[in-house]
Amino acid sequence: MSTPGGTVKADSSTHEVTATALGEWPGSDPFEAQRIIRGELGNPHLPFLAALPDRGPGSDALGRTLAMLVELPFDLQPHGWRLVAHPGRDQRRAESALSSDINALGDIAGAEEAPAGRIKIHLQGPLSLAANVHLHSGERALLDAGARREIYESLAVGAARLVQRIAAVSRGAAVIVQLDEPDADAVLAGRIPTASGFRTLRAIDRREATDAWGLVHAALRTAGSLRTVVAIPADDVVLDAALSSPAEALSLGVPGISDRQWERLAEAVEAGRELWTGVLPVAGSLPQVSAVVRTILDPWQRIGLPLSALDALTLVPVGGLAARSPATARLVLTRLTQAADALNQVRAEG
């Protein structure tokens, strides 16, 4: 597989605390989703291409990522998504949903007087993808080293092509790619169950994880992506692997970060890495802005990071928004931008 080249808008980085969301959104109308998201996440914040899992299979996190793979056909079985020899109806449905989302983004961006300079897309990362896709036999692709390699390569090429598609419809906006790795800790610890559920698959070496992220990152950079964000659980082994990767940013939920991990992250921030922090729980009542600000300021000051370094932060919710009402999802974005504004004020006064 060859990786396509291309260019997008020059680095549109900000030097402020910004806000975005992980990517899932309630409802089934991509036009309405984009209208709300781009309205709430104006400059300097980061709008994103929403996924709408309410539309059903193919719009879920896994099906959406499979829809942009190259040379790896798939279908949907009772046990989950499966790699097959030839594309079929399930693949066409997933590809159609992704195209609809991209077209909606293009229509909304095309009508804007001043389109956003940046846009984020999210995909399942290579480890979580391999852990949740099945081979024709029914076993997980994670079991087979050759299948894992094909998935990593296909993801790299497909993600690069997607970056170019997004840049084209969003009027040259700089594209940021978020690789979601919710299962990375289980993959590296050998806790992913086999198809039977009676045993677990062998752990993947963390060097393979680092190399897989590096492969996708290199393809994205060649395609013109602004930066890669690896979203990981707060696990020591996973954090070590991610810090060894070339990804320019890491995303973690603040409630699960230990003091030792904060120290590692502080070193990364001081070295120029960005940190995306899950600071706003979306289950139950939403916390007030002051509580969100303290969630990040307390550990930040405890480990001795200067307030001037707060511009390395992007604030995100803790969890996706698909299960919330559209009104609540909108309020989440509002509260995140308000928290970012408050942190920017703290930074300016510090």
Image: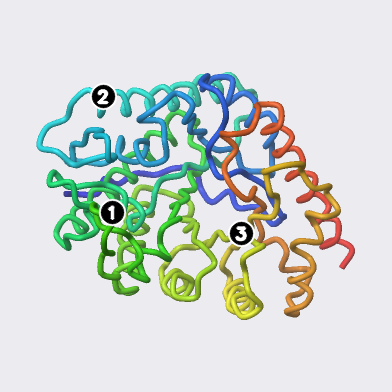
Relative to 215, say whether 151 is above or below: above
The C terminus - image quarter: bottom right
Residue at image coords 28%, 54%: 130
Q: Does dot 1 land on a helix, a strand or a loop?
A: helix
Give the number of the disc on residue 130. Answer: 1
User: In this orientation, which residue lies closer to the viewer: 199 or 3?
Assistant: 199
Q: Residue at x 37, y 25 (%)?
A: 99
**Alpha carbon distance from label 2 to label 1:** 21 Å
Secondary structure beneath label 2: helix
At label 3, the amino acid type is Gly
**Residue 315 image point, x, y percent:** 67, 52
* Residue displayed at 58% across by 48% down: 12
Quarter where residue 31 is shown = top right
* Sequence-earlier tag: 3 or 1: 1
Judge from the rendering whether residue 111 lies leftward or rightward of residue 149; answer left or right. Answer: right
- Residue 92 numbered mark, or none: 2
Reply above or below: 71 against 209: above
Left/right placement of residue 71 relative to residue 314 reads left
Residue sitting nearer the eye, 9 or 95: 95
Q: Earlier in the sequence, mark 2 or mark 1?
A: 2
* Residue tagged 3: 253
Q: Residue 11 or 315: which is nearer the viewer? A: 315
Picture coordinates of residue 226 (x, y %)? Answer: 48, 51
